[in-house]
């Protein structure tokens, strides 16, 4: 341990960081130790598993897209506009992050469920039902995932020098032009991080989904719901599905890290 | 390079009052075209605020700003013209190039923002690019440029949309002294070749004298001197240059 | 005269900022102080004060068992009965995984068999009560559901039906009922336990669900029950057993006896269960 130079880690930091690593790694090790390796491929190849995985991927991507399209403009408004009561809006937008997901599910049910405040009209006027459909899954996932994106993007936009936007406006750029050609590109690594975060949250989402969209294999049974239910019936299957979910998440996060998230610190 | 105005009222009038918690800016400036005005003064005197108000980046609390008889900002009658429609080109301190774009994209930004197609914008920009010798730098990124190159790009970018007013905020402050001296000649030529209103902010009295025709000295938000450049030798008789 | 600069200190325990160490120690002691619900009673079982009896019960019985527990405490003031509710399958799994508890009450024999096969019971499980199934619909039966055939697939107008996932007792019972009636049901969602079905009907998310009669009674005015003909209906056997790992086997056995006594049976019947005298197996 004879490092040269002044960048030495203070020992309390090393100890606590090691604890933190252990905190994250030990459960994974336990899971891998418990996993039914012999039957793993067999279990994962089952139709129900593949259906649930495919559904999770589709819905989480769609939810991330919804969160991005709606969340990025909101983040800009919170960061830049002089809207009155911004902190109240911010609290509202990020509330579903603090609440237990089931509460999110109950809220969605009360508003968009068949007897919900708005849902009943959706049913009567348009014949549209969101509960127990794929759209319900996407809605529930977007509801819990969006705050993460809003916070990340708002932070990123704050970091963008507003004088750049001033320069762009003085050159003749309309606010929308400046937003898409200057602000968002300058904030892109924060936006990317927000999108990935939102996707990850949507992929793992469970409480709001099962409450609002229910559990129907092929239509609303996501991988996280399948894992939860498998636990009561066959813990081996639950473990196998857990390994699958971790593998997918790991692959995405590691794969994207350098390409998208690593640009926060540009090497000069 | 810049167009001249055929109208009757060819003046830039700026009565600017900006109130902040620790600071009040209260100036009254009238400028004719084809004259370079230098605003000098210590840091915090309000020089940059004048430029920002003229450029529409900061609204004034009181007063009136008009160019060629066209009112840009008048709180009493709630008149406000957006920065994008003021025909004012600003060269910011340090250039303020968009580093998510290439040098070429920076230069044509103004035209593209107004709806020009890329090919057309490049065509229109060609003479300017050649004049400033930026042809080899077009595909580079701003972070690869030297201080002097950045300033040239910033000026080209501002001039491309043929503004009526050219504002320069501390144009040589990011250059080392050798580049600064080298640039002075070039800047003089650029300014003299720009037929419109020209305002330059600097804290260097020598630069003010070399580049401007008229000098206004600001201190703590007020005008304390207004003289011809050749009669200007420093901030005040008993203050040394910065 | 420049002031003296103290020499740089090497890291040692004294230099570790008290502002970090303090909270850290606090966290650790809270962690050590937290004990899982069960082992708390380990200490208490030897004391002369109240001891807590933990009953792991199927959701459909939790209300009845809580009432029974209160009555039991009236007779035995030193004992407090705590009911932990969950689907029988989830509860059985957790017992097998080592969850602490004194008594297990299951809504069917399958889950009880699982726990018995794992060798975790004090003795052979005995029947506690029986339950029947009923169709639960929204209060006032707005869609006019008359019988099981109204829940069939492809029926107009569409009646949304919820049930439980496979493995949960109510699901097996429901499948049997539909089987006997010769009807194929169409399900909208598969819940984790019977409580989930009740919630879906309650909130109007679905129109109907097949649940226990006791659930319909417990939901009161919020729902309406539609009876299932006896010829199709099943008898759901609720079973009870003392768990081998219990730290207070004596008290647990007493509680089971109480449940099967006339007093206990009266309480269960008040909730809608059917019981038989204790002499029956």
Image (cartoon, helix red, strand yellow):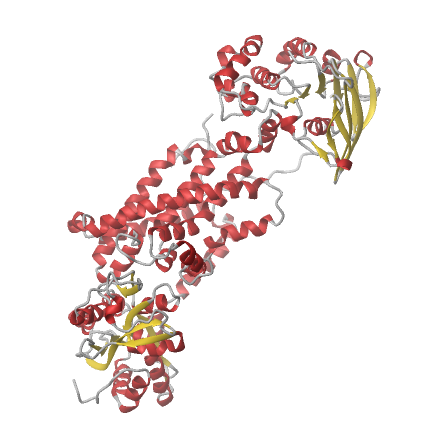
Q: Provide residue C229's location: percent of width, then percent of height.
A: 22, 78
The answer, for residue C62, to whether it is visible in the render is no
Viewer-proximal residue, A242 or A93?
Answer: A93
Q: Is residue A57 left or right of residue B230?
A: left
Q: Provide residue A228's location: percent of width, then percent of height.
A: 29, 58
Q: Provide residue A121's location: percent of width, then percent of height.
A: 44, 58
Viewer-proximal residue, B125 or C37?
Answer: B125
Examine the image and state in which quarter residue A170 appears: top right
Against A107, residue C258 (above or below) is below
Viewer-proximal residue, A249 or C132?
Answer: C132
Viewer-proximal residue, C41 or B222?
Answer: B222
Examine the image and state in which quarter residue A131 appears: bottom left
Q: How many marks?
A: 0
Residue at 53% in and 37% down: A157
Q: Provide residue B151's location: percent of width, then percent of height.
A: 60, 17
Q: Quadrant of the N terminus of chain B?
A: top right
Residue at 38% in and 73% down: C139
Q: Residue furthest bottom?
A: C262
Q: Quadrant of the C terminus of chain B?
A: top right
Residue at 43% in and 31% down: A4
The answer, for residue B80, to whether it is visible in the render is yes
Q: Is residue B225 left or right of residue A130?
A: right
């Amino acid at each position: 341990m004879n490092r040269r130079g002044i960048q030495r880690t203070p020992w309390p930091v090393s100890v606590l960081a090691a604890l933190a690593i252990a905190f994250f790694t030990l459960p994974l090790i336990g899971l891998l130790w418990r996993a039914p390796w012999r039957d793993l491929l067999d279990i994962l190849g089952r139709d129900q598993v593949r259906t649930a995985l495919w559904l999770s991927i589709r819905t989480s991507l769609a939810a991330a897209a919804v969160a991005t399209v709606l969340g990025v403009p909101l983040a800009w408004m919170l960061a830049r506009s002089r809207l009155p009561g911004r902190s109240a809006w911010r609290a509202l937008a990020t509330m579903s992050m603090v609440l237990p997901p089931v509460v999110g599910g109950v809220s969605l049910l009360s508003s968009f469920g068949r007897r919900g405040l708005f849902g009943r009209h959706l049913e009567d006027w348009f014949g549209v039902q969101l509960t127990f459909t794929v759209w319900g899954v996407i809605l529930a996932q977007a509801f819990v995932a969006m705050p993460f994106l809003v916070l990340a993007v708002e932070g990123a936009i704050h970091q963008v020098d507003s004088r750049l936007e001033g320069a762009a406006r003085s050159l003749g750029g309309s606010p929308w032009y400046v937003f898409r050609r200057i602000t968002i590109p300058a904030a892109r690594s924060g936006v990317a991080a927000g999108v990935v975060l939102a996707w990850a949250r949507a992929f793992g989402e469970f409480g709001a989904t099962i409450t609002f969209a229910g559990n129907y294999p092929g239509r609303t049974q996501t991988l996280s719901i399948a894992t939860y239910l498998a636990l009561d019936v066959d813990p081996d299957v639950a473990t196998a599905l857990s390994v699958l979910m971790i593998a997918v998440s790991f692959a995405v996060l590691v794969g994207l890290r350098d390409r998208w998230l690593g640009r926060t610190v540009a090497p000069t | 390079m810049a167009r001249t105005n055929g109208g009757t009222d060819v003046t830039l009038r700026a009565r600017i009052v900006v109130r902040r918690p620790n600071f009040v800016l209260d100036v009254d400036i009238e400028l004719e075209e084809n004259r370079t005005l230098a605003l000098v003064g210590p840091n915090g005197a309000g020089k940059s605020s004048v430029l920002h108000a003229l450029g529409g980046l900061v609204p004034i609390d009181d007063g009136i700003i008009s160019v060629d008889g066209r009112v840009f900002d008048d709180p009493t009658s709630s008149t406000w013209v957006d920065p994008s429609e003021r025909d004012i080109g600003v060269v910011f301190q340090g250039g303020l190039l968009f580093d998510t774009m290439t040098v070429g994209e920076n230069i044509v930004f103004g035209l593209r923002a107004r709806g020009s197609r890329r090919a057309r914008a490049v065509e229109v920009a060609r003479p300017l690019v050649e004049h400033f010798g930026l042809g080899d730098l077009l595909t580079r990124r701003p972070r690869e440029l030297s201080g002097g190159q950045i300033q040239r790009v910033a000026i080209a970018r501002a001039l491309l949309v043929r503004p009526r007013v050219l504002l320069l905020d501390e144009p040589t402050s990011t250059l080392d002294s050798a580049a600064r001296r080298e640039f002075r000649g070039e800047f003089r030529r650029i300014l003299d070749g720009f037929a419109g209103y020209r305002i330059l902010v600097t804290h260097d009295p020598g630069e003010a004298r070399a580049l401007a025709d008229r000098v206004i000295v600001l201190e703590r938000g007020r005008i304390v001197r207004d003289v011809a450049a050749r009669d200007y030798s420093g901030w005040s008789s008993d203050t040394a240059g910065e | 005269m420049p002031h003296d600069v103290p020499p740089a200190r090497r890291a040692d325990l004294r230099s570790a900022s008290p502002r970090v160490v303090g909270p850290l120690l606090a966290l650790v002691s809270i962690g050590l102080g937290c004990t899982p619900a069960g082992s708390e009673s380990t200490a208490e079982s030897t004391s002369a004060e109240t001891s807590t009896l933990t009953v792991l019960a199927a959701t459909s019985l939790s209300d009845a068992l809580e009432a029974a527990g209160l009555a039991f405490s009236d007779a035995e003031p030193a004992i407090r009965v705590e009911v932990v509710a969950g689907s029988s399958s989830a509860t059985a799994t957790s017992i097998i995984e080592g969850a602490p508890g004194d008594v297990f009450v299951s809504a069917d024999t399958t889950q009880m068999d699982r726990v018995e096969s794992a060798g975790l019971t004090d003795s052979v499980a005995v029947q506690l009560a029986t339950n029947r199934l009923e169709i639960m619909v929204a209060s006032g039966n707005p869609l006019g559901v008359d019988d099981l055939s109204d829940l069939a697939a492809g029926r107009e107008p569409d009646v949304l039906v919820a049930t439980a996932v496979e493995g949960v007792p109510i699901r097996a019972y429901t499948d049997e009922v539909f089987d006997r009636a010769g009807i194929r049901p169409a399900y909208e969602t598969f819940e984790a336990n019977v409580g989930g079905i009740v919630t879906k009907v309650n909130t109007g998310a679905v129109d109907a669900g097949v649940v226990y009669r006791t659930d319909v009674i417990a939901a009161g005015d919020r729902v309406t029950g539609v009876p299932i003909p006896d010829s199709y209906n099943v008898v759901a056997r609720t079973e009870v057993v003392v768990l081998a790992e219990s730290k207070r086997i004596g008290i647990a056995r007493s509680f089971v006896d109480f449940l099967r006594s006339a007093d206990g049976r009266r309480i269960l019947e008040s909730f809608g269960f059917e019981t038989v005298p204790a002499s029956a197996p």
